[in-house]
């Protein structure tokens, strides 16, 4: 009889037959073999929008209890053509979304059904936490919505599962690793904030998952998720909680010295150095001393900070004296004292005085600032105050009217063009205050529709400059932001789009110069339009100048102390319009007055004939000059070919390199940079490029 019901439904459906089959399956009177599954998919599912809520509920319940039906529905709907006119496909997507929303035990159910088979579990991970299910639903569900839904499913899984076997924690650890890799940025924030570090019971689950997971899984979670999460959150308010969490997770089994150097927060580095066992202290100290002797300008500040922490926190006076007397340390000090960089020499003497326990006679106001928190007398709390881990909105306080008028006058001094639209833009109205929310706006852009890209780029400039004292947060999201900004297309010809794109990229590079690696990788390895490439080059030159201390009118600077001021963000500002790709040339430096010239000629005058026009701004470019210059120069020598626009692009490229070369003075390896720059110019002349002015300027400089 049950078999006849199914056969009759396949021949011709009506409401009574549908209800009878669904009820029969629920009551287990009808077995769910592949034949029945396909009849449900092809006959019942297409009429889902017309079903009464009771039958919809029965269908969803059947799917939630049958992985065979669920997986075949995904396969079937994936084969349907993805088109706005294909309403049938949308019906299946709606069913799957309803299933995810209204059956939060779905993951738990399938885990129970498949727990005996590792192969099936791997497939389950790929469906939920890989790209298979999300790619299917991405047209109807954002990545953030999807992660939040899966977080609820994972919560139900933790609530319902009886972890009476260690291997259950191991399997959960593998599943959690897959979850974190779905979208590392958003998954980390959502699942840790809203679940695993939200309440004591879930923190205990999280601790057990990490503790009992295999070593590679444990290391993956700690290094790729937990440390980045704490790196942008650790402050004076919560460092004790983070210390307690990491102390209970035995993180020393997963870390190495290189990982330590990648962290931005000195407080987090302090916590880790005070947790690790003595044998690791010796190992880390040896590696820090080797880095100290090698003198890498780019990471010397971090190296010296870590070395100072190790000497201060974890070494005795006798151990420090042994270091001071070692041949390796003395040779390193000698090498560093011959360095042209004053800061490197000052750091050297500061550390030398520290290892001699203050007996070295050297007077200087220079200081290497490291955190000094006392964890020795810390009483172990019964419960960790997890609420202190939440990332707070940075406080913005309005100033009085006079302060606001002063701020407006600063913007007016920039000589910016004005937009016709005086209304506050949509992204300002959204009050974006977190970098993750800004990135989400870029991720959710529908590039086939008209979008207010200029407003979003303005918001990027504003927010990134506001957070210039919160570099760890900016640097964590910088790589993804750069990709999104560089690959935007001005399909609807928004006014000043390219100018604001350049401003946004320049701002990110100014606040996080190490992001140059990400933008150069994009420039060298990604298919980009000519205009996108030209904008990238322009941002490189302008960011080099701002880091060098020059104040260019092209660059909009949101002048505000983030803690104490909230200055108006005028939407009627726009940077000076840059020329189109066909006419675009990056403007040149005139070292005589540190300004940007509108023509492409570089002129030099003897400094003796000029009055001193020193900028009061600090030269931040010196330590970053090599990572800006060498990749560009080496790529030129490796060969560049852009076809029709090759000559135009190469001229822009060389003028960018010229700006970076001039800003590099007086860096430690300026002579080497100059030698390589001359080689690049010689190659440019061989290609018959009109760069005689650049050649003359470098000769005059020498």
Image (spheres, helix red, strand yellow):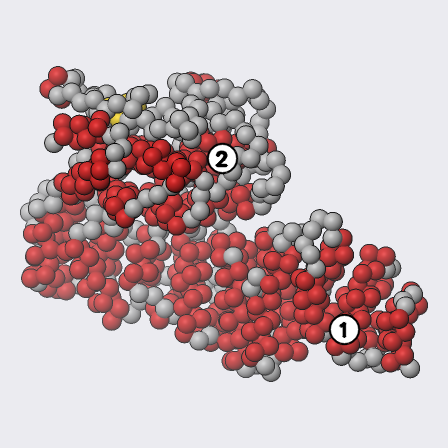
Q: Nearer the viewer, residue 217 or 86?
A: 86
Q: Nearer the viewer, residue 219 or 674?
A: 674
Image position, residue 160 (x, y; %): 64, 72
- Residue at 61% from the left image edge and 59% from the top image edge: 134
Image position, residue 692 (x, y; %): 21, 28
Image position, residue 458 (x, y; %): 49, 32
- Residue at 52% from the left image edge and 32% from the top image edge: 454
- Residue at 28% from the left image edge and 35% from the top image edge: 654
Mark 1 sits on what residue?
37
Image position, residue 275 (x, y; %): 33, 65
User: Is 341 left, or right, of 64 in this rendering?
Assistant: left
Q: Nearer the viewer, residue 50 or 65?
A: 50
Q: Nearer the viewer, residue 204 or 327?
A: 327
Mark 2 sits on what residue?
457
- Residue at 70% from the left image edge and 65% from the top image edge: 76
Is residue 428 visible to the viewer in this orientation of the structure?
no
Quadrant of residue 672 within the rendered picture: top left
Question: In which quadrant is the C terminus drawn?
Answer: top left
User: Is 59 left, or right, of 215 in this rendering?
Assistant: right
482, above or below 492, in the image = below
Task: Using a 10 Å C-alpha cutoff, classify the residue at mark 2 as few (fewer than 14 neighbours), some (14 to 19) or many (20 or more).
Answer: many
66, above or below 231, in the image = below
Quadrant of residue 37 within the rendered picture: bottom right
Is residue 184 visible to the viewer in this orientation of the structure?
yes
Task: Using a 10 Å C-alpha cutoff, classify the residue at mark 1 as few (fewer than 14 neighbours), some (14 to 19) or many (20 or more).
Answer: some
578, above or below 162, in the image = above
Q: Nearer the viewer, mark 2 or mark 1?
A: 1
**Who comes first in sequence, dot 2 or dot 1?**
1
Residue 307 numbered tag:
none
Label 2 – label 1 distance at C-alpha = 49 Å
Question: In which quadrant is the N terminus drawn?
Answer: bottom right
Query: Helix, strand, or loop for circle 2?
Result: helix
């Amino acid at each position: 009889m049950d078999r006849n019901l199914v056969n009759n439904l396949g021949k011709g459906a009506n409401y009574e037959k549908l209800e009878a089959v669904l009820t029969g399956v629920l009551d287990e009177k009808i077995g769910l073999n592949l034949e029945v599954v396909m009849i449900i998919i092809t006959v019942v599912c297409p009429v889902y929008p017309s079903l009464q809520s009771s039958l919809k509920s029965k269908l969803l319940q059947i799917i939630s209890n049958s992985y065979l039906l669920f997986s075949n529905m995904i396969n079937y709907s994936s084969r349907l053509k993805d088109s706005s006119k294909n309403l049938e496909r949308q019906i299946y997507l709606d069913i799957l979304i309803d299933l995810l929303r209204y059956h939060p035990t779905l993951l738990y159910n399938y885990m129970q059904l498949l727990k005996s088979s590792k192969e099936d579990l791997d497939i389950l991970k790929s469906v939920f936490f890989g790209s298979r299910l999300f790619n299917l639903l991405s047209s109807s569900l954002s990545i953030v919505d999807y992660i939040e839904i899966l977080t609820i499913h994972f919560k139900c899984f933790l609530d319902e599962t009886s972890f009476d076997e260690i291997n259950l924690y191991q399997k959960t650890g593998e599943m959690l690793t897959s979850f974190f890799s779905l979208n590392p940025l958003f998954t980390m924030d959502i699942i840790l904030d809203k679940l695993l570090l939200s309440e004591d019971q879930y923190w205990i689950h999280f601790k057990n998952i990490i503790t009992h997971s295999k070593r590679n899984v444990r290391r993956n979670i700690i290094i790729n998720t937990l440390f980045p999460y704490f790196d942008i959150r650790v402050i004076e308010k919560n460092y004790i909680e983070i210390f307690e969490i990491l102390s209970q997770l035995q993180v020393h089994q997963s870390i190495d010295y290189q990982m330590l150097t990648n962290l931005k927060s000195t407080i987090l580095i302090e916590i880790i150095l005070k947790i690790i066992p003595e044998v690791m202290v010796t190992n880390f100290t040896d590696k820090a001393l080797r880095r100290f002797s090698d003198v890498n300008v780019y990471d010397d500040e971090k190296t010296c900070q870590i070395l100072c922490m190790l000497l201060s926190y974890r070494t005795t006076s006798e151990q420090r004296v042994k270091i001071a007397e070692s041949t390796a340390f003395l040779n390193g000090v000698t090498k560093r004292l011959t360095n042209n960089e004053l800061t490197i020499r000052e750091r050297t003497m500061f550390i030398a005085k520290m290892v001699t326990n203050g007996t070295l006679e050297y007077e200087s106001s220079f200081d290497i600032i490291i955190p000094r928190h006392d964890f020795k007398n810390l009483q172990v709390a019964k419960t960790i105050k997890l609420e202190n881990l939440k990332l707070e909105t940075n406080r913005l306080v309005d100033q009085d009217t006079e302060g606001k008028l002063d701020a407006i006058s600063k913007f007016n001094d920039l000589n910016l063009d004005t937009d016709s639209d005086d209304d506050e833009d949509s992204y300002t109205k959204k009050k974006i205050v977190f970098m993750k929310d800004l990135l989400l706006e870029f991720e959710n852009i529908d590039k086939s529709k008209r979008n207010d890209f200029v407003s979003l780029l303005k918001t990027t400039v504003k927010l990134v400059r506001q957070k210039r004292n919160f570099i760890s947060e900016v640097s964590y999201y910088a790589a993804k932001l750069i990709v999104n900004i560089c690959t935007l297309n001005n399909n609807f010809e928004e006014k000043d789009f390219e100018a604001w794109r350049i401003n946004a990229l320049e701002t990110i590079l100014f606040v996080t110069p190490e992001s140059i690696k990400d933008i150069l990788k994009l420039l060298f390895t990604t298919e980009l339009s000519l205009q996108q490439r030209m904008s990238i080059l322009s941002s490189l030159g302008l960011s080099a100048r701002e880091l060098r201390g020059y104040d260019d009118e092209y660059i909009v600077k949101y002048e505000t102390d983030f803690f104490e001021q909230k200055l108006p963000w005028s939407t009627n500002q726009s940077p000076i319009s840059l020329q189109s790709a066909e006419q675009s040339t990056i403007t040149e430096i005139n070292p005589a007055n540190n300004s940007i010239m509108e023509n492409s000629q570089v002129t030099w005058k003897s400094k003796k004939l000029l009055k001193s026009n020193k900028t009061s701004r600090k030269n931040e470019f010196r330590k970053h000059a090599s990572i800006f210059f060498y990749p560009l120069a080496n790529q030129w020598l490796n060969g560049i070919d852009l076809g029709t626009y090759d000559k135009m692009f190469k001229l822009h490229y060389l003028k960018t390199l010229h700006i970076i070369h001039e800003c590099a003075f007086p860096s430690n390896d300026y002579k080497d940079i100059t030698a390589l720059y001359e080689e690049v110019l010689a190659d440019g002349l061989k290609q018959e490029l009109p760069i005689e002015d650049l050649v003359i300027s470098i000769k005059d400089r020498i």
